Image (cartoon, helix red, strand yellow):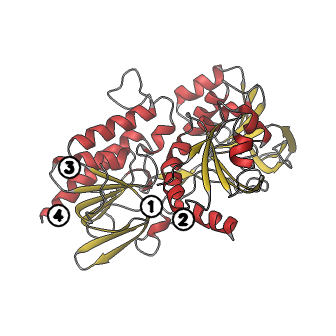
């Protein structure tokens, strides 16, 4: 359901990932008039996951897209309003909280910020110039373009290893380049990657430059312990080194840490009364779908208390 | 309301390269989630830029010829064609306001 004319709500939720949708399920069941604002497609980052294997209750795993759709259906059942718009800012006007969007202003008594995070850039020469020409940030999108070609994945966390495993289905060889001497990824993912003959690891190594004119040709690498430099010929490089919170629109409104994350207390309250935060954008979030969902539920329960005060 | 049109390997020449007005081609695939995110934004823009820019969608999975010709190695990938030539390219998901800047630049 798309909200068009209505501009006033009890609760506005920014972001339609697991945190936002869980918050919406709770606020709607509390009979709070709730609006969820999403800039793209509801589901959030889990929709990038071919299979979510660690969400309790789904013993056989569930595709990320399906999990997102199930959450959306559950929220819709209790009357959550969803609109597609980009949030551009937040303001306080007397006791109202105003959310500025590309579809105009919406006001609410409480706001739950759940706008998540996105892939961060490596910041290496050649990265920007060759984005779309072999440099990619989405293995599920672009893996089929690298059939039978050698590629690299930069990073050592869950996303990097999940992407390497997905890419191994297409590429001739996948080299995981990690700046440390061991992975950060969950052990079960590491076991799978080590058992996959197409995947190789380059430890203690950083990418200094991505070379190529019309297409990625080569990576210039440096071994951080020995300082030794080397080259690696690849047709593509997938960057999976970290995440950056989607909080640019909050600058000047809410105190953010250096990296842009929001500090909350254990009730998901930010420093501004009536403004809550949930999921990946919280400082020290575990960055899991299930913890985001938990955050969303907690934020909703506390938003309800705040409104009824 | 103007909606994005579907183009394929066979119709690309006529519908895109020979178009009298600029054409934005959205290179996408069903497995690409950011492409699905971009779709509603492009639909809105198609209405807003009706008669100024034609919006077209090309499924790279089904239309390998055109995708290979323009060296598509990442999606979503938007290329704006003017008088048969690519004049602007946007790789990855971008919010609407940023896309509008690129569209307006092409119309200048």
Q: Residue at x 53, y 60 (%)?
A: B96
Q: What separation in Å lies between label 3 and label 1 (alpha carbons)?
A: 22 Å
Q: Which of pointers 3 and 2 indicates the residue nearer the eye? A: 2
Q: Which of pointers 1 and 4 indicates the residue nearer the eye? A: 1
**Going from the N terminus, do you reach mark 3 or mark 1 first?**
3
Say yes or no: labels 4 and 2 on the same chain.
no
Residue of label 2: B97
Q: Is residue A143 left or right of residue A301?
A: right
For the question of whether residue A184 can be seen, the reply is no
**Marks 1 & 4, CB-CB < 8 Å contact:** no
Q: What separation in Å lies between label 4 and label 2 (alpha carbons)?
A: 33 Å
Q: Secondary structure at mark 4?
A: helix
Q: What separation in Å lies between label 4 and label 3 (alpha carbons)?
A: 14 Å
Q: Residue at x 51, y 38 (%)?
A: A48
Residue of label 4: A307
Q: Position of residue A61 (x, y in %)?
A: 42, 25
Q: Nearer the viewer, residue B15 or A165?
A: B15
Chain of the residue under the numbered disc 2 shown in the image: B
Q: What separation in Å lies between label 3 and label 2 (alpha carbons)?
A: 31 Å
Residue of label 3: A28
Say yes or no: labels 1 and 2 on the same chain.
no
**Crowd rating for badge 4 (residues with CA inside 10 Å; few <14, some 14–19, many 20+):** some
Q: What separation in Å lies between label 1 and label 2 (alpha carbons)?
A: 9 Å
**Marks 1 & 2, CB-CB < 8 Å contact:** yes
**Going from the N terminus, do you reach mark 1 or mark 4 first?**
1
Q: Hey, which quadrant is residue A95 in on the image?
A: bottom left
């Amino acid at each position: 359901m798309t909200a068009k004319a209505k501009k006033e709500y009890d609760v506005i939720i920014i972001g339609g990932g697991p945190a936002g949708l869980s918050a919406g399920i709770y606020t709607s069941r509390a009979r709070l008039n709730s609006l969820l604002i999403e800039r793209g497609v509801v589901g959030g980052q889990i929709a990038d996951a071919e299979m979510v294997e660690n969400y309790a209750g789904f013993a056989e795993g569930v595709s990320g897209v399906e999990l997102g759709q199930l959450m959306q259906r559950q929220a819709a059942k209790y009357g959550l309003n969803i609109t597609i718009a980009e949030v551009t800012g937040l303001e306080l006007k007397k006791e109202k909280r105003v959310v500025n969007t590309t579809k105009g202003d919406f006001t609410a008594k409480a706001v739950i910020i759940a706008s998540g995070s996105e892939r961060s850039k490596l910041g290496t020469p050649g990265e920007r110039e060759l984005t779309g020409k072999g440099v990619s940030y989405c293995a599920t999108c672009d893996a089929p373009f690298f059939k039978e070609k050698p590629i690299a994945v930069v990073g050592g966390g869950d996303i990097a290893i999940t992407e390497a495993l997905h890419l191994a289905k297409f590429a001739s060889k996948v080299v995981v380049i990690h700046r440390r001497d061991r992975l950060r990824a969950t052990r079960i993912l590491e076991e799978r990657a080590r058992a996959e003959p197409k995947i190789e690891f380059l430890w203690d190594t950083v990418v200094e430059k991505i070379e190529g004119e019309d297409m990625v040709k080569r990576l210039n690498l440096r071994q951080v312990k020995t300082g030794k430099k080397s080259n690696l010929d690849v047709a593509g490089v997938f960057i999976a080194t970290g995440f950056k919170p989607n909080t640019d629109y909050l600058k000047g409104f809410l105190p953010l840490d250096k990296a842009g994350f929001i500090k909350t207390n254990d009730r998901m309250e930010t420093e501004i009364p009536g403004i809550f935060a949930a999921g990946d954008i919280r400082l020290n979030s575990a960055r899991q779908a299930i913890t985001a969902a938990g955050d969303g539920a907690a934020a909703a329960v506390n938003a309800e208390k705040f409104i009824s005060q | 309301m103007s909606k994005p049109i579907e183009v394929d390997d066979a119709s690309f020449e006529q519908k895109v390269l020979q178009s009298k007005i600029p054409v934005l081609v959205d290179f996408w695939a069903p497995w690409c989630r950011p492409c699905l995110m971009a779709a509603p934004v492009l639909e809105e823009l198609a209405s807003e830029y009706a008669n100024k820019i034609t919006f077209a969608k090309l499924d790279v999975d089904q239309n390998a010829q055109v995708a290979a010709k323009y060296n598509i190695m990442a999606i979503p990938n938007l290329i704006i064609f003017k008088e048969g030539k690519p004049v602007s390219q946007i790789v990855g998901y971008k919010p609407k306001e940023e896309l509008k800047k690129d569209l307006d630049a092409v119309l200048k």
